Amino acid sequence: MKKTILALGLAGLVTSGMAQAVEGSVDVGEHSTNLSVGLGSQSPGLFLKGNWLRSNDDGSVSGATLGYNLSVGPFNVSPAAKALYTHPSDGKDGFTVAVGSGVSYQLNSMWGVYGEYYYAPKSFSDHLERYQQAGGGISFSPISLVSLRAGYQYVGLKNTNNNKDNVLVDGPYISASVSF
């Protein structure tokens, strides 16, 4: 009986994911580029997202995010956990798990505002004192398949053993995403 319930639950999770849209986006800042692809990140329910962030000067971060979108009217909250591989230019490579949330509010059918914050303490990290990511801005969706965003983002790695800290992103950026 337990195996049947588990199998039905997993089947429901898989089929609900198949109905979700696939998204791809590119974020470009003055000294950084972030590529991401996601499944269900724009609709209510479970979502999965992968990304690769590269700084021209301070290294890179890549990983996967698992979260859940909770929507109440135009307001959306997305608690999530990120499993990340960090490659700082001035420290040791390693893994970390950051937890946090994104929030968004749709002002009308085309305009919205958003923000996010993720944090990983030393106890969640390998070779890092902490990982921090914060961002926010405005979004514009002229059609349902395309979204353009502009905002400010910060991604910082505080290294251990007196190594220089690495700030991968600290400034304005623009983004374009496509859903299909």
Image: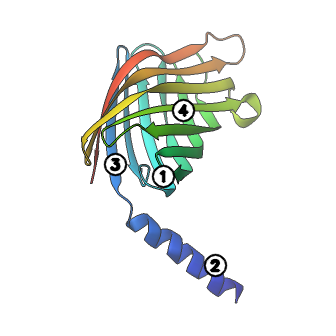
Point out the tag, 3 or 4, that comes first from the N-terminus. 3
Q: CA distance from mark 4 to mark 1?
A: 16 Å
Q: CA distance from mark 2 to mark 1?
A: 21 Å
Observer-side mark, 4 or 1, equals: 4
Q: Secondary structure at mark 4?
A: strand
Report whether 163 appears left or right of 166: right
Q: Are marks 4 and 1 in contact (CB under 8 Å)?
A: no
The amino acid sitting under disc 2 is: Leu
Q: Secondary structure at mark 2?
A: helix
Q: Which residue is mark 3?
A: 23
Query: Which of 90 and 100 lies nearest the eye of the viewer?
Result: 100
- The circle on residue 154 is none
Q: CA distance from mark 3 to mark 4?
A: 18 Å
Q: Which residue is mark 1?
A: 48
Q: Are marks 3 and 4 in contact (CB under 8 Å)?
A: no
Q: Are marks 2 and 1 in contact (CB under 8 Å)?
A: no
In the rendered view, would you say 61 is above or below 43? Answer: above
Circle 3 residues within 10 Å: few <14, some 14–19, many ≥20? some
Observer-side mark, 2 or 3, equals: 3
- The circle on residue 6 is 2
Point out the tag, 2 or 1, that comes first from the N-terminus. 2
Outermost right residue: 123
